[in-house]
Image: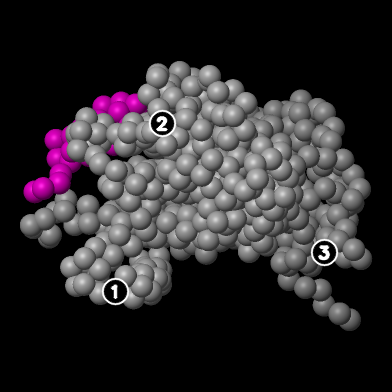
Amino acid sequence: MIYREAGDFHTSYREDNQTFPIRFDRYRYYAVLAIAFVVIPFFINDYWANALLLPFLIYSIAAIGLNILTGYCGQVSLGTGGFMAVGAYACYKLMTAFPEVSMFIHVILAGGITAGVGMLFGLPSLRIKGFYLAVATLAAQFFLVWLFNRVPWFYNYSASGQISAPERTVFGIAVTGPNTESWATYLFCLIFLVASALIARNLTRGTLGRTWMAIRDMDIAAEIIGVNPLRAKLTAFGISSFFVGVSGALFFAVYLGAVEVGEAFGIQKSFLILFMVIIGGLGSIFGSFAGAAFLVLLPVLLKVVGADMLGWPTDIVAHFQLIIVGAMIVLFLVLEPHGLAQLWRVAKEKLRLWPFPH
Amino acid sequence: MKDMSEGYVTEDGRKIGGVVMEMKNITLRFGGVVAIQDISFDIREGEIRAIIGPNGAGKSSMLNVISGFYVPSEGEVWYKGEKRPPMRPYQVAQQGIARTFQNIALFEGMSVLDNVMTGRLTQMKSSIFSQALWKGRAEAEEVANREVAEKVIDFLEIQHIRKTPVGRLPYGLKKRVELARALAAEPTILLLDEPMAGMNVEEKEDMCRFILDVNDEFGTTIALIEHDMGVVMDLSDRVVVMDYGKKIGDGSPDEVRNNKEVIDAYLGVAHD
C-alpha cells in the first residue's frame, strides 16, 4: 500500500541499472535532497550545526570510505583515524601554503594525498588477510599519529603542537576559521557528502564494485575470472582513503577548527568509524549514513532525555551514555549482524505487501 | 588410428579443429610428493576432452596447472601455438580460459546477475573516473556487457533467479550459476571440475544438456573432470586417464574403455 513497485516497468538495461529503480524511492530521494539543500540552511543555527549536522555529515563521508574498504572489499582496517589525520594535516599544509586557493580544491587535494598514503599502507594486504591485516593497519594508525606529533614541519613549528585552521573562503564566503556562518559550513560539508555518496554508489554498482565484492567473497575465484588482486585491493584502499581523507580535512578545518592529533584522530576514532560501518551495515552506502546518524544522534538524544528532561547530573548522564551506546552496539551485533541497512531492507519487504501479507 | 593433425569431423557432424592447448611432459612436485609425473596431452579446438581417474590421481592438479594456480615443476604448456610463460591465474583468465570449481566458488554476497557479470570483468576497460560519474564508456560498457550476461542467463535458464542472492540458492542451481559465470567470459577453453558432483539424475541430465549445447552452439572447447563414467563416455570426444599422477590411457571413449591398464586402475588387479 504505502510502498509498491506495481506498474513500474523497465524496458531497458539502463533503466534497470538506476540507483533507485523504484519510482517511489527516486522521488523520496529527490525530496530529501531538496530539504537538505533548500530548507535546512534557512533554519539551521550553531547548536544544530555543531552538535548534530556537521558531525553527521563528516562521519558519513568517513563511514562511506571505510565501508568501501571493509564492507565492499572485505579488508578490515583500524587505521581510519590515522588516515583522517593525513587528510587533516594535508589540508592544513595546503591551506597555509596556498591561502588564495579555494577551499574546495584544498579538501579534494587532501583527499588525493590521503589516497596515496592509503595505497602505500594497503600494500601488505596482498600478503596478509583478516585479523593480521587489521593489526598492520593498526600500525599505520599509531605511526601516522606519532609522525604528526613528532615532526614539527607538519604543524608549521607552532608552539603548542596543534594545528588550527585559518580563515579560508569559497566564492568569498568563509567556511573555515572563527567567523563562519553555520549555513555555510553546513552546505560546504553537505556538497562533499552528496558528491561522495554519488561517486561511491556509482563505483560500487559497476565494474569496480563487482571486482571488490569478488575479492571480498572469495579471492581465489576472483582471480580465476580475471581479477588482479593487487589492483583490486589497492584501488579499494586508495578510493576508501580518499573519502576518509576528505572527511578528516573537513573534520579539522570546518568542524573543529583546531586539533591536537592524538586527541582528534586517535585509535578511538578508528573504532568509532568501524562501529558506524558495522552498525549501519557492511556493504551498503545507506548503511554508512544510518550508522553515522545512529552514533552521532544517540549520545545527543540520551543527553537530552537524561540531563534536560529527567534532570540528572551531567556526569551520570555521560557515564550512562557510554553504557547504553556500548550495550546497543552489542545488541545490534547479536540481533542484526547486517546492521541498520538490513533492517531497512526487511522493513521495505514488509511494506510492499502491507496490509495483506499473503 | 586416423590422422587428426588437421582436425576431423565427429560422427554427429561437429567439426574438431587443430590443437589449441598442449601439455608437454608436465611434472608437478610438492616437496617429495609427485602429484603429476611427465604427462603430455593435447586439447583440440571444439572438442570435449575428459580427464578421468581414481581419487588422488592428480586430475584437479592438472586443471590447476592449466588455469595457472600451480606452476609445473617441469614441462611446458603451449596455448594457441605459443609456449606459455608462468603466469598468475588472472592472466590466464584474460587469455580466454575460464573454469568452474569442484566445490562451488561463487560470490555468495552478490546476486546471480552480479555473479554472471563478474564473468565479464576481463572485458571491462573503462577508467575509474568514467565509472565514478557513471557516464560515457562506463555506462555503455555496463549495458553492452549486461546483454551478453543476459544471453548466458537465458541460455542456462536461470532468468527467474536473476536478482536472488546466490547464498539463498540450492546446490544444483549454484552449479548452474557457476557455469554461467564461466560462460559469460566467452572463453576459448572452458575447464569444468566435476560439474556433476553431488547432483541427482535430473540435475545431471540438465547439466549434460547444457554442456553439449555450449559446445555445439558457441563452439567452446571444453575440458572436464568427472567421476560419473556414463556421463564421461557419452559426452566426451577424447578421454585422458590418470592414475597416481601418471597417464595410463588416452583416446576415444571406446579405446579407453577397453584399455587393460585403465580397467586395472578402476577395478584393481588380482595379485597372484
* Chain at tag 2: A
Comes first in the chain, label 2 or label 1: 2
Of A344 and B195, nearer the camera is A344
- Mark 1 belongs to which amino acid? Pro
Q: Are marks 2 and 1 on the same chain?
A: yes
The magenta stretch spans residue A37: no
Q: Which mark is residue B244?
A: 3
Visible residue check, residue B202: no
* Chain at tag 1: A
- Identify the residue at image location x=84%, y=36%: B85
| Magenta extent | A1-25
Q: How many marks?
A: 3
The nearer-to-camera label among 3 and 2 is 2
Q: Quadrant of residue B90?
A: top right
Secondary element under disc 1, as helix, strand or loop, is: loop
Of A214 and A330, nearer the camera is A330
Q: Which mark is residue A313?
A: 1
